[in-house]
Each structure stands twice: as structure tokens, then as C-alpha cells.
Amino acid sequence: MSILSRFFKNKATEEKVLPGELISQSSERGYRPNPDDRMKYMYRLMWVDPAFRQSVIDIRAMDRADTRVKRVHKKTASTLTKSGLCLSMKQENARVRKLWDSMVKRLGLNKRQKLISDTRGYLMEGNLMMQWVLGPDNKVWQGIRMPSETMIADVNPNGVFKDAQTAFKQMDLMTGGVIDSFALWQITHGRLDPDNYDDKGSMGRPLMDASREIWKKLTMTEEDLVIRRRDRAPLQKVHVLEGATEPELKEYENGINERRKIAPIDLDYFLNKKGGVTSLQGDENLDHIKDISLLIDSFFAGAPAPKGMFGYTEGLNRDILQDMRRDFFEEVDTMQDEISSVYREGFELELLLNNIDPNKYDFEVKFNERVTETPNQAADRALKIQATGASVETVWEIAGVDTRRELNRLQTQKDSNDPYPDPTNIGNQNVSITEGNAPKKESATSVSNK
């Protein structure tokens, strides 16, 4: 049973639960905090977590100042949202489907910009705190991403909400007052790597949180390198006048400076006593400095993908890159699940507002395509499932195709007397699979007509 449905209705009595009643029933239960957690809880009673707020501020500054950090966030967010959201139902229901389509349009979830904005905030803040705004017709009209560094979850020391009616508070960081409070159903909180998942007051961590110190050292070293190059790289000359007095040296120096004002390029020098001009080469070892490479490797060790995916391809083995890409896609799948669960809870609220119990329907809100597999791997696996006699809807779902949209298109083709054969008829096809005959030892799949 979902949190929202438990909050809105008591299943045993079919009556609405009073605000806070659900939470108070379990207020004494929860995880058992250690002494450090208790100190953090005491501080949260008065103010937002300063360490978490500083990490968010640092990550935002890094994203604005450094193209590498921006690339990490943009690449990851684009990969997460490239296929868009979809509603998958075990048994199709026209009313539930209509409510989903309507909500997606109202909230702009069919727009890539909205999904990327929410995802970038999730990556940079480590939290996706979505506020659900209801319209006058009791429908979810907006899903607004709140700045998580200003939000406090009002929980007891055991990490359980004190009151469902004031579960979250937004602080005014200028005055120290409370801007507004939100009921449990108004805020859905998605977290990235929280210290303790069972503690509802534990915030998530930004994606690049552990790379902040490395980034400071990296930018400092790069700036020092530029200063060193500017000071030591130019060609310098030593003028030696044997036996010259101090006034003679000064006169000679002034003469050289006057000539350089007229002609910036060094010309010939003329001496009336024994002496010489010796050239000193600039810093010839700038290309031997390994500090930058070490810091870049350390910085991208905290990124979700190898540095080769963000533009640093020198010395990177292609086979190793493929293995690291697979690790990246697995991490992306985990983040997809967390973000989609936030939208699912918003849709459950929409169903409850329309007198529909979400627990009566087996549905899932998810991103339409998983990125763990390449398109070729997904198609290969779908064809293997097809060869076992699985339904076409299952095959499409495995391949990452919107099943409902394809069924509508097929119905449209059938209604228009399409002369081409029905693509759902797999009885006249042969599917042959050759193990290990494709790149990376994958199976090679061949489909042909009988």
C-alpha cells in the first residue's frame, strides 16, 4: 500500500485518516540513531544542515565555472531522460490511461526540457523534492522542483515524521523564519545516496559531492601552471659587461630599454668593452608536469562515467571504455528508478483525487528505455523472447517501444485497409540465433521469412 493511499484513506474503515494520525501511530518506532545523528537532529530543529547546503552551493558554482562539471551533469541528465516517461500497465484501463495522458500534458512531463531540468537538479542537489500543486478542479496542475537546501523534513529523532500535515518546512535563510510548511502528500522526496534511507530527514548527496576537494586542487594547479608559463616560458637574455661600473650598467640598461620601445623585437647589441649576451631558454619541462593528469583522473573517479565519455580520450583503451560504459549505464538505471518513483507518487495522488485506489491497478511509471543495453542488444533480446512464443506486447516492451502507441498505430493501419502484411503475425518468420557471433561475444540474431 502506498504512503499516499494510507494517508488519504483508512482501508479498514474506509474513512479519511485525520492529519498526523498515521504518523503518530509509528512515531516511537524507526531506526535507532547514533550520537552523531542525534546532534544533527538537534541542529535540524533550528536550521538547515550547513554541510549539505554548502555542498549544494559548491556544486552549483562548479557547474557554472567549469565545463567539465557541466558536461558531467548534462551528459548524465540527457542519458537519463532520453526516452521520456511512460505508463506501463499489466492490464490496460482506459480511465487510468486517460488520467495519465492528461497529467503528463498539464505538468509538461512530455517535454524533454522539464525532465532534464528536474534531473539536473536531482544530480546537483542529490535530492528531488517535488511539490504537487492542486488546481481548483482538484487535479494535480503543477509539479514544482523545490530548492532542497532550504527544505527541512520535520521528523523525530527516530527519523519518522511527527505530523503528516506539516511534514516539510521551507526556511528563509535570510531571516531564519519558516516560509511555508507542506503536508506529506504535497512533497515527494527522491534522494541520491542518503546516509540512512530509513531516516526520512536524511538528505541525499550531490552526484559530484566527493569530487569537490579534488576540483579545488585541480583548478588551483591549472592556474599555477598558467602563471608559471607566463613567468618562465619567455626567452630571456643575460647581458654581461665585464668590469663595468654601476653607472655604466645603468646607462647600458636604459639604452636597451629605449631601443625596445622603438622596436619590440630584440635587435643586435653593440658593446665597447669586453662582454657578452647569453640567451636563457624558457621553461622547457612544462609538458612533463603530471600533476594535472593525476588530478583529472582523481576528479573523474567520482564521476558516474569514465573521463573518455566527457572528452578526455588520450590513452584510453577502447575495450576498457566499453566495460566502464556498462557500469555507467547500470548506475543510470538506478537513478532512473528513483526519479520515476517521484512521478509515480504524483500520479497516485492524481488517481486518489479522482476516487481511484492506486492499489487496485498494477501499473508502473518508468522511463521508456533502459540504457543498460545498447539498442542492438535490446532488439536481440526481444527477438529471442519472440522466438519462444511470447506475446508481441511483451516483445515491444523489452525492445523499449511504447506498446500502447504501437497498438494504436496497428489499429489505424488495419482500419485503413493497409495492403501490407500484419507485422504482429510471426507465424511466417524464422528467428535464428548464433551464440558469440557478434561483437563483444554477443549473440547474432537473424530474422527471415519462411
Image (tube, rainbow, N blue to C red):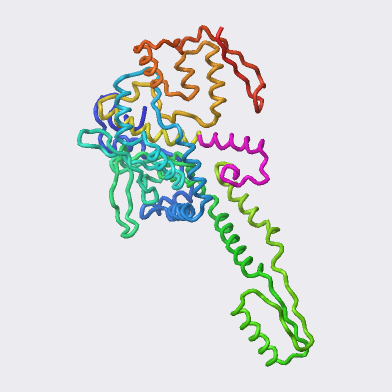
Q: Is residue 98 magenta?
A: no
Residue sitting at x 40%, y 26%: 364
Q: Is residue 205 left or right of residue 10?
A: right
Q: Residue furthest left?
A: 136
Q: Is residue 234 left or right of residue 153?
A: right
Q: Main secondary structure of the magenta part?
A: helix
| The one of 220 and 421 positioned closer to us in this rendering | 421
Residue 123 percent coordinates (x, y) = 46, 44
Residue 369 percent coordinates (x, y) = 47, 29
Q: Looking at the rendering, in which quadrant would you find the N terminus?
A: top left
Q: To which quarter of the image does residue 230 belong?
A: bottom right
Residue extent of the magenta highlight: 306-332
| The one of 396 and 23 positioned closer to us in this rendering | 396
Q: To which quarter of the image does residue 14 belong?
A: top left
Q: Is residue 46 left or right of residue 429?
A: left
Residue 37 percent coordinates (x, y) = 46, 49
Residue sitting at x 50%, y 41%: 76
| The one of 327 and 319 positioned closer to us in this rendering | 319
Position of 284 relative to 105 (above/below): below
Residue sitting at x 44%, y 11%: 420
